[in-house]
Image: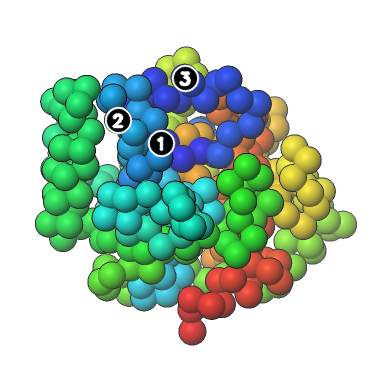
Amino acid sequence: MRRLITLAFALGLMLSLAAPAGAITNGSPDSGEHPYVGELLFYVPDAIDDRFNDPGGWFTCTGTLIEEMIVLTAGHCTFAIGLNGASTTEGDGDGNGGNDVWINFEEVPDFEILDPSSSFGPDGNAARYAQWSAALNGSSEWHQGTATSHTDYSDPAFFLADAGILELASDPGIDEWATLAPLDHLDQYSTRRDPTKRFTAVGYGLETGFPTFLGGDTRMQAEMKLVSLRGAYGAGKGISAAFSSNASQGKGGTCFGDSGGPLFDGDLLVAVTSFGISFNCVEPGGFYRIDQEDDASFIGGFIG
């Protein structure tokens, strides 16, 4: 669940059965353990923000540095991002190539450089974009990128190819990167199930969902239990897997804003947070596997 910078939109999402996923529930502070995981802030010109008369919405997700200037995230966190404020989906646009996206690798990113949305009137969405994009470009902590979704990505069925890449315009100065898992890495757990085995999810999402919507914008981690490798909520075997952070009840884990965040098996990045079906963030989350051949091919087009 990518997170819009307004809780009113999150309430609107409740009308859907499934939504792109979003925060770490029942988690703990990351405490510098994953310095290569950052928070994305991006602008979608086609999105609706009910506080404004004209379209344009800002969202947050999570991403992971996998090479010096390459970030892996979810496909729904890279699709339809604006290009200097203009739509990338209108006309012949395919939703790729947008540069209205920035990432911050601090444990608690600084949003105070952005004037509050409430300070702009109903006709002030363009002014908000101008102020926010200028502030982000002027910050040494926020790094701009260019977004590309998986070759097979389709927004109506985002969960079937939910991987995306950011190519950063400048070196963020992080000298440690995540290591991608080899092909079919997760398959080993389909027959060899260890009830004590835990995976680690990392993200900047909300700590609780509906009705409180608390926390967020702080890098957190949670220990996850494998629920199923046979697909998550119908997404299909080999595409998605279900994980939960509450081992006793099989519930909890990710919430709004964690989308695109990594799932680690030890030091290996095996999946990214993709979607959930519960707006109170207490059900097992769907994680998009990146240890499949089509994903290796897509990602391999950007890294050495």
Residue 47 image label: 1
Q: CA distance from mark 1 to mark 3?
A: 15 Å
Residue 102 seen in this snapshot: no
Residue 1 image label: none
The kind of secondary structure element at disc 3 is helix
Residue assigned mark 3: 11
Residue 54 image label: 2
For the view shown, which residue lies furthest in the top direction? Answer: 211
Left or right relative to 294: residue 214: left
How far from the left and from the top, in percent, is residue 83? 32, 56
Give the quarter of the image for residue 216: top left
For the view shown, which residue lies furthest in the bottom direction? Answer: 304
**Amino acid type for the residue under numbered disc 2:** Asp
Q: CA distance from mark 3 to mark 2?
A: 20 Å
> Which residue occupies 77% across, 57% down?
238
> Which residue occupies 87% across, 57% down?
191
> Which residue occupies 61% across, 56% down?
153
**Comparing labels 1 and 2, the label whose residue is closer to the camera:** 2
| Crowd tier of the residue under label 3, counting other residues whose Cα lies within 10 Å: few below 14, some 14–19, many 20 or above | some
